Amino acid sequence: MNIVVNGEEKELKEGISLFDLLQKLSLENKVMAAAINMEIVKQNSWKETILKDGDKLELLDFVGGG
């Protein structure tokens, strides 16, 4: 299946969860917020959230500044 992650197309196996993808990308401890098709997915739901072909995923990391 194909999804788009932060504007970049990725090919993944069927049935992968959002959490599994974050682990695969080594981002599970860096991402603060995730949205699939413009809908925020709460962090406590990442393991149960299964990605689907065509999903558009946005991963956000909050950076402090001044």
Image (cartoon, rainbow, N blue to C red):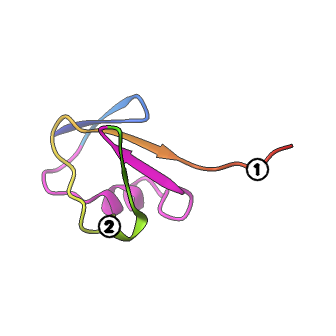
- Residue type, mark 1 in image: Gly
Q: Secondary structure at mark 2?
A: helix
- Residue type, mark 2 in image: Ser
- Estimate the x, y position of residue 21 in percent, counting from the top left: 33, 55
Label 2–label 1 contact, CB within 8 A: no
- Tell which circle, 2 or 1, labels the residue nearer the N-terminal end: 2
- Estimate the x, y position of residue 23 in percent, counting from the top left: 40, 62
Q: 10 Å neighbourhood of mark 2: few (<14), some, or many (≥20)?
A: few
Q: Is residue 28 above or below residue 4?
A: below
Residue 19 magenta-highlighted: yes
Q: Secondary structure at mark 1?
A: loop
- Estimate the x, y position of residue 12 in percent, counting from the top left: 22, 45
What range of the chain is rendered magenta? 12-37
Viewer-nearest residue: 48 or 40: 40
Viewer-nearest residue: 4 or 45: 45
Judging by the rendered image, the residue that carries numbered circle 2 is: 45
Assign the C terminus to one quadrant of the image. top right
Question: Which residue is rendered at x = 58% and y = 49% of the image?
Answer: 61
Residue at the front extreme?
A: 39
Judging by the rendered image, the residue that carries numbered circle 1 is: 64
- Estimate the x, y position of residue 37 in percent, counting from the top left: 29, 38
Residue 21 magenta-highlighted: yes
Question: Which residue is rendered at x = 43% and y = 52% of the image?
Answer: 25
Q: How far apart are labels 2 and 1 at the CA level?
A: 25 Å
Task: Please indicate whether residue 46 sits to the left or right of residue 26 in the image.
Answer: left
Question: Which residue is rendered at x = 16% and y = 45% of the image?
Answer: 52
Task: Please indicate whether residue 32 sits to the left or right of residue 6 in the image.
Answer: right
